[in-house]
Image (cartoon, rainbow, N blue to C red):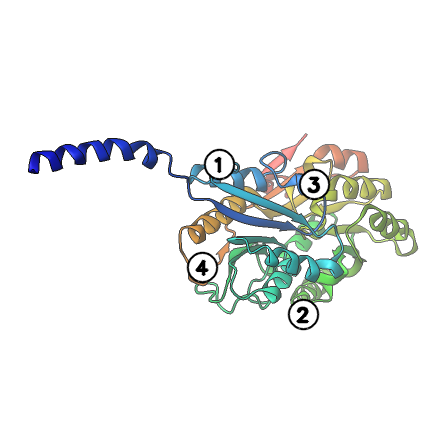
Amino acid sequence: MRRRDFTMGLLLAAATQPLLAQEPTKQHRIAIVIPAGAVAIISDTGSRYWPAFFEELRRLGDIEGHNLTIERYSGEGRPEGFPDLAREIVGRNPDVIVAVTNPLALAVRAATGTIPIVWIGVQAIGTGLVTSLAHPSGNVTGVSFYDAEFYAKRLQILKEALPSASKVAWLNMRSSFEAPYGQAFQRAFLEAGKQLEVSVVPMLLQESTPSEYQRVFGNIAQDRPDAIMVSDIGDFFPYRQLIVELIEKSRLPAIYGFREYVEAGGLMSYSADTGEAGRRMADDVLEILNGAKPGDIPIYQSTRFEFVINLNSAKALGLTFPPALLPLADEVVE
């Protein structure tokens, strides 16, 4: 009897092996929402952020089309539509929502207190998204590029490059500028401006669309600044080539929020390492998919920053950088 039981056991084991081998891989589903531009930019090509994000996901075992489904959304540059878009995404009940920029993360968090949110933006505490960097609690974690003081540093670099500048336009979205957390940036600029003897003049867009960029830059001659500082808000990133071209047409020097603007022909940038940020975001997503609670994952603050100068653009503007500034650059494009 025992021998027959043993034989039957072998037969059953052999019969079930193919079934075990064919057991479906556990599927994960995440939603990614960006503030502007086409959803096609959420891919493993192009700028440093998304390739780093997807490469890290693959390295850790989550591959789109295999065990990972990604739903892509865009706010199409219109902040007034973010709340409706957030409710639509939440209604589909993904495992994780990746929200790019503060306004989108705030809209998504207002729509759900349970679905995990992995966010990237600035001033995590100042936005009201979390109460602690080490222990965010709630359903939000992610990456904070930096706080308001970093913008003051960008203004300082611009002043060093253009000692005679006394008025700098700050290109930003009105929705971010007027948000409560935007007041911290205004205070930082006001304090830095006094020390540098520079006035910072808001240059605000209602929405991130090509026609709105054309409108704002069409009015620049009415109150012409000495230079422009472009916010690193994610709403602008899909239109970086257009922004650079409009600034070049205005014949104004500018400092940008990401090195990709310099690669598009911009004068200079001082920014966090977007590749590092993308990898950290992917790590957070994978931790949550593997069972971690977002409130237990510390907010990551960028530690790598880079200053990039484009000498070709400087030459086109007839601008000569002070000798002391060039050695400070992490990269000089010639």
Alpha carbon separation for disc pair 2 and 1:
42 Å
Q: Residue 188 falls in which quadrant of the image? A: bottom right
Mark 1 is on which residue type? His
The type of residue carrying mark 3 is: Tyr
* Cα distance between the residues tagged 4 and 2: 23 Å
Q: Neighbour class for label 2 at 10 Å: few (<14), some, many (≥20)?
A: few
Residue wearing tag 2: 180
Depth check: give the residue in front, 62 or 231.
62
| Mark 3: few/some/many CA within 10 Å (<14, 14-19, 20+) | many
Which residue corresponds to mark 1? 66
Compared to 11, does 67 lie above or below? below
Residue farthest toward the front in the current orientation of the protein: 1
- Look at the numbered disc 1 and give the secondary structure of its residue: loop
Residue type, label 4? Pro
**Distance of mark 1 from mark 4, alpha carbons?**
29 Å
- Observer able to see residue 165: yes
Which of the two labelled residues, at mark 4 and mark 2, occupies the earlier sequence position? 2
